[in-house]
Image (cartoon, rainbow, N blue to C red):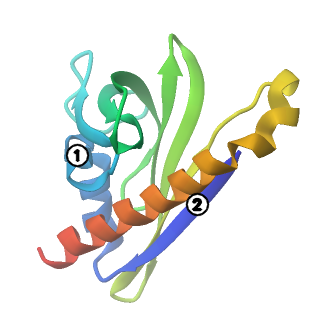
Amino acid sequence: MRDSATVVIDAPALDIWNVVADIRNTGKFSPETFEAEWLDGATGPALGAKFRGHVKRNEIGPIYWTTCRVTACTPGEEFGFEVLVGERAVNNWHYAFDPSGDSTKVTESFWLPFPALLRPLEPLYFLRRRRNVRDMTTTLHRIKDYVEKG
């Protein structure tokens, strides 16, 4: 299962990337993840760096921590991470930054891998997809407001 949301932000790509890639900002923007912190001595975004996010699923619970690993980290171009269970990726999130003049098109996407055995059930996850698209749109608009207001 995968989907995405896109918003145009009136700011340079690198400025927006700096806000997004500092995962300590996540709680300002995400409807579900209300705080995040770097792990294992990481102090900022870097390929392979780990962090954890404190999640309130669907904004009502349950509340839990997830461990994540940065999978894409090119300043001003992309930032991505995978959500881990142990060392296995169970979800992937990605931001792409496409500058155009004084604005940047920012696309947030997710990809949830389905094991072959469960693929026939994937259509049943339409509610999660719809929720994710709604939350990505909310997140991007909050980032837009934050960045554009300085």
Secondary structure type for disc 1: helix
Query: Residue visible at 28% across and 65% down?
Result: 143
Q: Nearer the viewer, residue 21 or 149?
A: 149
Badge 1 amino acid = Gly
Residue 100: x and y in percent read 45, 84
Position of 55 relative to 102 (above/below): above
**Pointer 2: what residue?**
4
Q: Tell me if I can see residue 98 in this picture.
A: no
Residue 78: x and y in percent read 46, 55
Which is more N-terminal, label 1 or label 2?
2
Residue 41 in which image quadrant? top left
Residue 52: x and y in percent read 31, 26
Question: What number is the disc on residue 27?
Answer: 1
Query: Residue visible at 54% across and 59% down?
Result: 133
Position of 100 relative to 89 (above/below): below
Query: Residue visible at 33% across and 35% down?
Result: 56
Does 80 sit left or right of 88 as displayed?
left
Position of 99 relative to 123 (above/below): below
Q: Nearer the viewer, residue 83 or 61?
A: 61
